[in-house]
Amino acid sequence: SQQGEEDPQALSIQEGENATMNCSYKTSINNLQWYRQNSGRGLVHLILIRSNEREKHSGRLRVTLDTSKKSSSLLITASRAADTASYFCATGMNRDDKIIFGKGTRLHILP
Amino acid sequence: DARVTQTPRHKVTEMGQEVTMRCQPILGHNTVFWYRQTMMQGLELLAYFRNRAPLDDSGMPKDRFSAEMPDATLATLKIQPSEPRDSAVYFCASGLHTGSQTGELFFGEGSRLTVL
């Protein structure tokens, strides 16, 4: 069963704009991670935020975590054509450390 | 350049045949996950191991799927007999569990299975 659910399912924006993706989850977590997947490839880790952290930055990425609302957001600033991919959130479960993925957001950057 | 290696990359087989997928995790990683990806279901967790011991395989159809780690450098996922509904991309990922949690996962390129 899915733990995380991303929103929106698909997003198209112009190059240079910011892209925001959201993730909601159901149960207590150790950490939350965001991954990227290019078509036909394996997933690549982007950023990990621990349950006691509220915000984290990495280059053009900004992740927030609100454990009271059981939600996270991924912001990609100044988007580029190369950012076109699917983005997944993954929750590290508190109880047994399973890592469960959502269904992802398909991001398309228009030139 | 450390990476997770999966074989085969592509497999086409007929219903009823046995399929074995292999994964070489990154040296030093103590946790291995198997996921299945389809358009409809997304990424489903099938099984995971820590220090070669199976921790959870509740995501697998028990009657036909089995997962093992014969040694620290090899994880296997076997389907016997295979069915058309098993057609999917199967991913292996490894990571390091320290303290109370596992950090980032490193994924292989996947094994694309088609069962006719």
Image: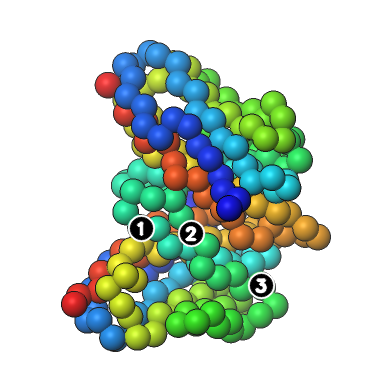
- Foreground residue among A88 and B3: B3
Image x and y of residue A14, in percent: 22, 81
Measured in 3D between alpha carbons, the distance from the residue under mark 1 to the one under mark 2, in whole angstroms, is: 9 Å
Instruction: Tell me whether marks 2 and 3 sit on the same chain.
Output: yes
Specify whether residue A25 is in view: no
Q: Secondary structure at mark 2?
A: strand
Image x and y of residue B115, in percent: 32, 24
Q: Chain of mark 3?
A: A
Q: Is residue A46 above or below residue B106?
A: below
Q: Earlier in the sequence, mark 1 or mark 2?
A: 1
The numbered mark at residue A50 is 3
Measured in 3D between alpha carbons, the distance from the residue under mark 3 to the one under mark 1, in whole angstroms, is: 25 Å
Specify whether residue B4 is in view: yes
The numbered mark at residue A44 is 2
The residue depicted at 48 percent of the width and 59 percent of the height is A44
Q: Earlier in the sequence, mark 3 or mark 1?
A: 1
Discs 1, 2 touching: Cβ within 8 Å: yes
Q: Nearer the viewer, mark 3 or mark 1?
A: 1
Q: Chain of mark 2?
A: A
Q: Residue placed farthest to the right in the image? A: B99
The residue depicted at 32 percent of the width and 28 percent of the height is B114
The residue depicted at 62 percent of the width and 42 percent of the height is B25
Q: Secondary structure at mark 3?
A: strand
Image x and y of residue A10, in percent: 28, 67
Measured in 3D between alpha carbons, the distance from the residue under mark 2 to the one under mark 3, in whole angstroms, is: 18 Å
Q: Quadrant of the C terminus of chain B?
A: top left
Left or right: A70 with respect to A23? right
Left or right: B53 with respect to A42? right
Q: Residues within 10 Å of mark 2 (few under 14, many from 20)?
A: some
Give the residue type at disc 2.
Val
Residue marked by disc 1: A38
